[in-house]
Amino acid sequence: MAYSLNTVPRTLACTAVVGGLLLLTGCGGSSSADTGDDALKVGVLFPGSLSDDGFMESAYLGYQRAAKQHDGKVSFSKVEQVAPADYEQALVRFATTSDLVISLGGQTDAAVRKVAARFPKVKFAEIGGPADGKPLANLALYDPQQAEGAYLAGAASALLSKKGTVAFVGGAELPAIVNAAEEFENGAKAADPGVKVLTPQYVGDFNDAAKAKQSALADYGAGADVLGQILNLGHKGVAQAAAQSGGTLIGGPIAHDCGTEKGYAGYVETDIGAEIEYSVDQLAAGSWKAEAVHFGLTFDTPHNDIVLCGTVDASVTEKLDELKAKIADGRTVTR
């Protein structure tokens, strides 16, 4: 299954500095100036860069699709690259003017819960928070199943490893990322019970390529030859370490054409943006609910897959297909 997520142009427009935050309105769709006063208003908090080639960019592509789909009916605004200390301020600004506020990433969980409680008449949605989190009366939780993607990455890593040792690098030691690291190991062991999985490393910053490179070099030095990762800009550091050490990594959540990037053994595809589309579609249809929704292979339209690069033995793809089928029919649960 291919998403061609990297074909949407990365364009930003209508910028304004508000209270120290860079507020971006109407990019990829209508702004409040051309939708009319009766338009529904949606504000989206992107803590990271919209061009990180990772979680945030995948989400932004869905933001663009939603803005195009609901042009003239929904007014969109967003803010990117927000420091943790400013999450609450950004969410409050959106809550005072929006019908729906969406926050990206588990790092925003505490802030969005606090602000949602302050604005009970505003709808909120959090994408990528704790998989076992509980919705509030006005807060929906959308799980992109990063753990599911990590499980597939672990399985692929084990099947592709020539040294029988693999490892995982995460951006921060958040509940969702720790769970993903555990599922990476579960996937590796399901594919090859004899594989060695090193202790996961957490960089402390999803975007710090230098620190991610150090962590990856340590794993390659400890014997791993294939790494899984959940990083944003930081994945570039892992790729650098792979090139330096002769190892490989599993990329994602945006898959690129194989061969265009050195060191990539394959890609996990996770369409984070589909969850923005889901929430906005529900809002526009008047059917929005404060619900917990788990996307991925068990959802009506799967948003996770894995693509391997290079010449791969048929037994590898057969094993991955078997493991995906077990997730899709509920025999394997990754959350």
Image: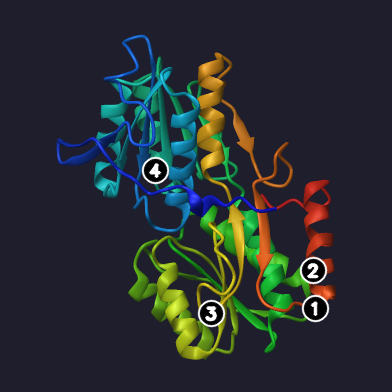
Farthest residue, direction top: 38
Q: Which mark is residue 263?
A: 3
Q: Which mark is residue 317?
A: 2
The percent coordinates of residue 239 (x first, y second) are 47, 76
Image-quadrant location for residue 67: top left
Dot 4 alpha-carbon crowd within 10 angstroms: few under 14, some 14 to 19, many 20 or more = many
Disc 1 vs disc 2: Cβ atoms closer than 8 Å?
A: yes
Residue type, mark 2 in image: Thr
Residue 204 in view, yes or no: yes
Label 2 to label 3, Cα distance in Å? 20 Å
Q: Nearer the viewer, mark 4 or mark 2?
A: 2
Residue at position x 64%, y 39% in the image: 294
Residue at position x 64%, y 41% in the image: 295
Label 1 to label 4, Cα distance in Å? 41 Å
Residue type, mark 4 in image: Thr
Position of residue 325 relative to residue 72, above or below, is below
Question: Which residue in the structure is indicated by mark 1?
Answer: 313
Position of residue 96 relative to residue 219, above or below, is above
Label 4 to label 3, Cα distance in Å? 32 Å
Which numbered disc flags the more N-terminal residue, 4 or 2? 4
Residue at position x 61%, y 50% in the image: 3
Which numbered disc flags the more N-terminal residue, 3 or 1? 3
Q: Secondary structure at mark 2?
A: helix
Which numbered disc flags the more N-terminal residue, 1 or 4? 4
Disc 1 vs disc 4: Cβ atoms closer than 8 Å?
A: no
Q: Secondary structure at mark 3?
A: loop
Question: Which residue in the structure is indicated by mark 4?
Answer: 108
Q: Secondary structure at mark 4?
A: helix
Residue type, mark 3 in image: Gly
Residue type, mark 1 in image: Asp
